[in-house]
Amino acid sequence: MPLKIVAFLTPKPGSETALRQAVAAVVAGSRAETGNLRYDAWHDAAAGRIVIDELYVDHAAIDAHREAAHYKAFRAAVADLLAAPPEVSVLNEIEVA
């Protein structure tokens, strides 16, 4: 059964462009992962944050993503760009088309 992750990233003032660049890099690498079904980034203008929408085939795929070099590089790159730790939810399917 697929699993969805939704992550909210709030940039520090002045770091919006750098955060977008880091997100673009992690999106490209994540989409190439074997267990990844979807990896999209959205801008929530009202809240001033980036929303990452991810879909994986299973927990093993999520574990592989978290161990991938591009993901570890992303986490290191954004550590000083975020106003707060990322808000991350892992969601289980109920009724999905």
Image (tube, rainbow, N blue to C red):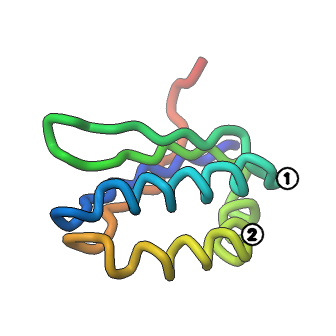
Q: In the shown orientation, is residue 93 left or right of residue 78?
A: right
Tell me the kind of residue under disc 1: Thr
Coordinates of residue 46 in the picture (x, y in percent): 14, 35
User: Residue, x 25% and y 62% (percent of image)?
Assistant: 11
* Marking on residue 90: none
Task: Verify CB contact (< 8 Å) between mark 2 and mark 1.
Answer: yes
Taking the spot 36% from the left edge, 55% from the top edge, the residue there is: 17
Residue 8, image x and y in percent?
33, 54
Depicted 79 relative to depicted 28: above or below? below
Disc number at residue 64? Answer: 2
Give the quadrant of residue 84: bottom left
Front-lying residue, 2 or 62: 62
The quadrant where residue 33 appears: bottom right
Q: Which residue is drawn at 15% across and 43% down?
A: 47
Q: In this view, does 41 lie to the left or right of 48?
A: right
SS category of the residue bearing label 2: helix
Measured from the top left, where is residue 2 in percent x and y?
Answer: 67, 43
Label 2 is placed on what type of residue? Ala
Going 32% across and 72% down the picture, which residue do you hit? Answer: 81
Between the C-alphas of marks 2 and 1, the distance is: 9 Å
Q: Indicate the quadrant where residue 69 lies.
A: bottom right
At label 1, counting other C-alpha atoms closer than 10 Å, the crowd grade (few under 14, some 14-19, many 20 or more) is few
Residue 19: x and y in percent read 39, 60
* Secondary structure at numbered mark 1: loop
Quarter occupied by the N terminus:
top right
Up/down of 79 relative to 86, above or below? below
- The residue that label 1 is drawn on is 34
Q: Looking at the image, is mark 2 or mark 1 earlier in the sequence?
A: 1
